[in-house]
Amino acid sequence: MTVAVPAAPSAAVPVLRYALRDAVRGRWAPLYALFFGAVTDALFRFSGGGEQVLLSLLNVVLLLVPLVSLVFGVAYLYGARAFVELMLAQPIRRRALFAGLYGGLLAPLALVLVLGVGLPFAWHGGAALAGPLARLLGAGVLLTAAFLALAFLVAVRFEDRMKGLGAALVLWLLLAVVYDGVVLMVAYAFAAYPLERPMIALAMLNPISLARVLLLLDLDVAALLGYTGAAFERFFGTAWGTGLTLGALLGWVAAPLALALRRFHRKDF
Amino acid sequence: MTTAARSAPSTSTFPLPSKEDGGERSALPPPILTAEGLVKRFGRREVLRGVDLALGRGRVTAVVGPNGSGKTTLVKALLGLVHPDAGRITFDGAEVRPGDVAYRARVGYMPQAARFPENLTAREVLALLRALRPAEAADETLAAALGLAGEMDRPLRQLSGGTRQKVNAAVAFLFRPALVVLDEPTAGLDPVAAGVLKDRIRAEQTRGTAFLLTSHLMGEIEELADDLVFLLDGRVRFAGPPAALRALTGEGRLERALAHLMTAAR
């Protein structure tokens, strides 16, 4: 007797649907949305409004989206360990399960960011800023995708939950905080040399820098914030720079995701 | 009736029952699942050292052994959760190759820890599993027999450990599997639910369903097991019916017979 049921790649879809449902019903999703809503609302009330809100929001997004994506992604995967084992005992390919879990987490995280920031813009009448806002949110969603992929990589790499959470926090600290300091030190130490190319290379190595450059080029205030942004604008001109940065950022989604999937494939549960 | 068709190659420390101990073997259908020479290493630690196993249709095979003997790893290797370093597994006569998942459509699994996405309901978990096997008819009679009807629409995080374990049991029997793997099945169940589960196991047995059982409860093994596989340090030290083990060791009680086996093998 042969087995009649083929393990269709579409098996990722039901997993995604139920992971999404599980995530949306959890307590963290409304809290995350509320937080972004409150911050955006406060920025509208206390700063001049308009572009200033966007610039402040940019910094909040660049710091917090990676943190939340990493911590939530890692915590979810460790919590779902027994469920993953149960699912792997079903006729489903590991790739499909992986894709379902990733999509099921990415969708609510991205949705919450878009709604949490977008709705206050709508009720404060920020229609004039719709374009830049959409690009800010787009970059935020890309960052979410990149750091969720990194979270998956961390979670499949470390057996131990505490080690995994620790690694996620260290990763965030390195990319979000320490990295800029190092870049500044390099810039300061080698101030006498032409640094544009090395600076551009350094920015490519960090998805947060990439997102920042992307948004600063877009807002046309590159010279105001950060050395890397200025270097990028001068070196590429805007269209080129945007394309390259976007590509590199997508690479930051694809590369960790591919590595995590490879490990997930070989992992013993 | 011999379930483990082969004895492990390196079991000279203790006399294994020969195939002749079995009896009516010739009349038996081929086993639903076989494993040959399964080896699994975690780093330098060799957890399975050439395990042979055959699970007979309509029979309950209990894998027993002390903690760390490789029981969990063996079960996970058979389910595809753990990738063996060497060895061969067949299901229903066909070789299971790395990455093969289709055979699992006919395997039910009841893990020891009953943990589901906590914001889903039991009904949704069953629906998810059904969506993965679109071609198969689901059988939710066990859920009903376990009294889960009133709990199906509550989030799983609100259910007690025992109730979640009932959901787990219902999941394992959902698709009339040819093989059911039960990892400490009655650990969290109340006596009534444990009784319902055991009745279901016996009923399925008569339909030819094979069972692989791990348990620390000797009484449960005495009650259910048709065959024993005794694992020690990653090797099969005994495979055969409980009566053969008792005869071999001269001990009347299974617990003592296993203890006898353990001390003799050390």
Image (spheres, rainbow, N blue to C red):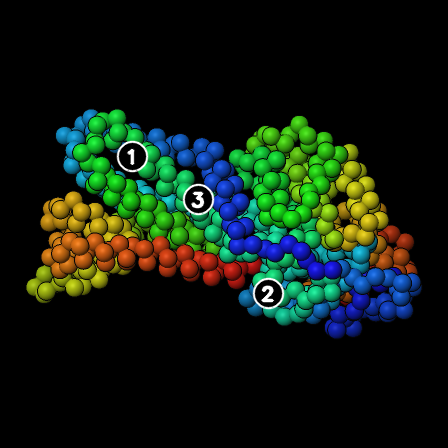
Q: Residue at x 79, y 69 (%)?
A: B6
Please rate how many residues cluster around mark 1, counting C-alpha atoms within 10 Å: few if below 14, some from 14 to 19, many from 20.
many
Q: Residue at x 74, y 53 (%)?
A: B178
Decide which of A214, A61 is in the foreground and name it: A214
| Mark 3 and mark 1 on one chain | yes
Q: Residue at x 67, y 47 (%)?
A: B136
- Residue that numbered label 2 is attached to: B98
Q: Position of residue B215 (x, y in %)?
A: 74, 49
Instruction: Identify which amino acid the numbered label 1 is placed on.
Output: Val
Q: Which disc number belongs to residue A117?
A: 1
> Is B144 on the left-hand or right-hand side of A134?
right
Instruction: Identify which amino acid the numbered label 3 is placed on.
Output: Leu
Q: CA distance from mark 3 to mark 1?
A: 19 Å
- Residue that numbered label 3 is attached to: A105
- Which residue extends farthest left? A192
Q: CA distance from mark 3 to mark 2?
A: 28 Å
Identify the chain of the residue marked 3, using the numbered disc in the image.
A
Identify the chain of the residue marked 2, using the numbered disc in the image.
B
Decide which of B23, B51 is in the foreground and name it: B23
In what element is the residue under mark 1? helix
Look at the picture and state if B54 lies above or below A147: below
| Mark 2 and mark 1 on one chain | no
Pick the quarter of the image with the N terminus of chain B: bottom right
Q: Which disc number belongs to residue A36?
A: none
